[in-house]
C-alpha cells in the first residue's frame, strides 16, 4: 500500500483543552480547527467544553458563546445570522453549511467545526474566497442591454420571471463549490457550481441581450465540462438550490444552439 506523507507544516496537531468553569451538568465538547498565519506553528484542533443550558440553538450561537466567554482569539466570519449573507459558511459535522442556520442539536456526539474544504485558510475558520469572486466577476453578473438607461423598467412576463426562481436566491456562500471534487482539483480553471449557477441566472434572463456571448464565455472544457454531475453541490446548498441542474441546462443550451 502506498503511504502518503503530508508536508510537516500541514499536519494537524492536538491543541488546547478548555474545561468548563460553570459547573454545568449539560456540557458538549466542541472541536475547532485553529491556525494562525502570524506564527510558524502547525494547525491544531482546540477543544472547548460548553454549557448548553445557556446557549441558543444554532452553531453560530455556539461559536459566539465560545468567543465571548471562553476564547476571544478564535476567528470566523459572520454577519446577518439569518441565512442571507453567506458569511458564516463552514464545515460542521463533516458537511458544508451555514453556521447561523445549522442547529447544533442535529449533531450527535462531539461538534467538529472546520473551515470550508480545499480553500486556502486565512486564519482559523476563515477561507480565502478571492479566486471564487474573481470567477464570479468573469461571468459579468449584471444585466446587459442596449436600451438607454432612462430609469424606465425592463418589463418581463410572469412566465419569464419564474425561470429565475431557484437561481437568484444564491448567496455565494461557496458551500456548493467547496463540496465539489472537480473544483478541489481544478479550482483555478473550472468555474464551479456557484459561479455557473450565477452565469445561468443571467443567460436565462429574458431581459438580457447578451445570451450568445455569455454561452460562448462558459463553453470551455475546463470552465464548464469539469462537472461530472455527482450532485455534491445540490446536497450541500443551504438554500435548497440545484446548481447541478443549472449546469446541465447550460450544457443543453450549448448542445442545441
Image (cartoon, rainbow, N blue to C red):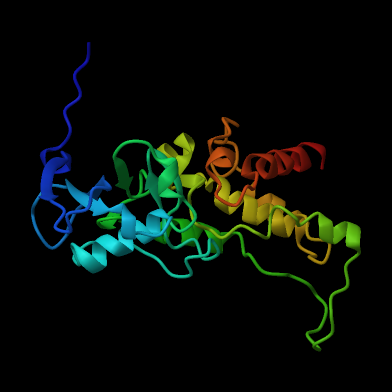
- How many numbered circles does the render carry? 0
Residue depicted at 81% across the width and 83% down the height = 148
Residue 176, image x, y percentages: 52, 45
Q: Quadrant of the N terminus?
A: top left
The answer to which quarter of the image holds residue 229 is top right
Residue 256, image x, y percentages: 82, 38
Placement of 149 over or under 96, stated as above or below: below
Residue depicted at 88% across the width and 67% down the height = 156
Placement of 18 over or under 69, stated as above or below: above
Residue 144, image x, y percentages: 73, 70
Judge left or right: residue 196 versus residue 23: right
Residue depicted at 37% across the width and 40% down the height = 93
The answer to which quarter of the image holds residue 198 is bottom right
Placement of 72 over or under 216, stated as above or below: below
**One can see residue 75 in this view:** no
Q: Quadrant of the C terminus?
A: top right
**One can see residue 172 in this view:** yes
Amino acid at each position: 500500500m502506498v503511504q502518503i506523507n503530508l508536508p510537516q507544516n500541514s499536519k494537524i496537531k492536538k491543541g488546547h483543552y478548555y474545561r468548563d468553569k460553570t459547573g454545568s451538568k449539560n456540557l458538549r465538547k466542541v472541536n475547532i480547527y485553529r491556525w494562525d498565519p502570524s506564527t510558524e506553528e502547525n494547525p491544531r484542533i482546540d477543544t472547548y467544553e460548553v454549557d448548553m443550558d445557556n446557549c441558543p440553538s444554532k452553531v453560530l450561537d455556539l461559536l459566539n458563546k465560545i468567543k465571548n466567554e471562553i476564547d476571544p482569539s478564535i476567528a470566523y466570519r459572520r454577519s446577518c445570522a439569518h441565512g442571507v449573507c453567506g458569511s458564516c459558511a463552514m464545515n460542521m459535522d463533516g458537511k458544508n453549511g451555514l453556521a447561523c442556520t445549522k442547529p447544533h442539536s442535529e449533531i450527535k456526539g462531539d461538534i467538529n467545526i472546520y473551515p470550508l474544504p480545499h480553500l486556502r485558510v486565512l486564519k482559523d475558520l476563515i477561507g480565502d474566497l478571492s479566486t471564487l469572486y474573481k470567477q464570479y466577476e468573469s461571468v459579468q453578473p449584471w444585466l446587459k442591454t442596449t436600451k438607454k438607461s432612462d430609469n424606465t423598467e425592463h418589463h418581463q412576463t410572469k412566465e419569464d420571471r419564474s425561470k429565475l426562481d431557484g437561481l437568484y436566491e444564491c448567496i455565494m456562500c461557496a458551500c456548493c463549490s467547496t463540496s465539489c471534487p472537480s473544483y478541489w482539483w481544478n479550482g483555478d480553471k473550472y468555474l464551479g457550481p456557484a459561479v455557473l449557477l450565477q452565469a445561468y441566472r443571467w443567460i436565462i434572463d429574458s431581459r438580457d441581450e447578451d445570451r450568445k456571448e455569455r454561452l460562448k464565455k462558459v463553453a470551455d472544457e475546463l470552465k464548464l465540462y469539469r462537472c461530472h454531475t455527482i450532485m455534491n453541490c445540490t446536497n450541500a446548498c443551504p438554500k435548497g438550490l440545484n446548481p447541478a441542474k443549472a449546469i446541465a441546462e447550460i450544457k443543453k443550451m450549448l448542445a442545441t444552439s
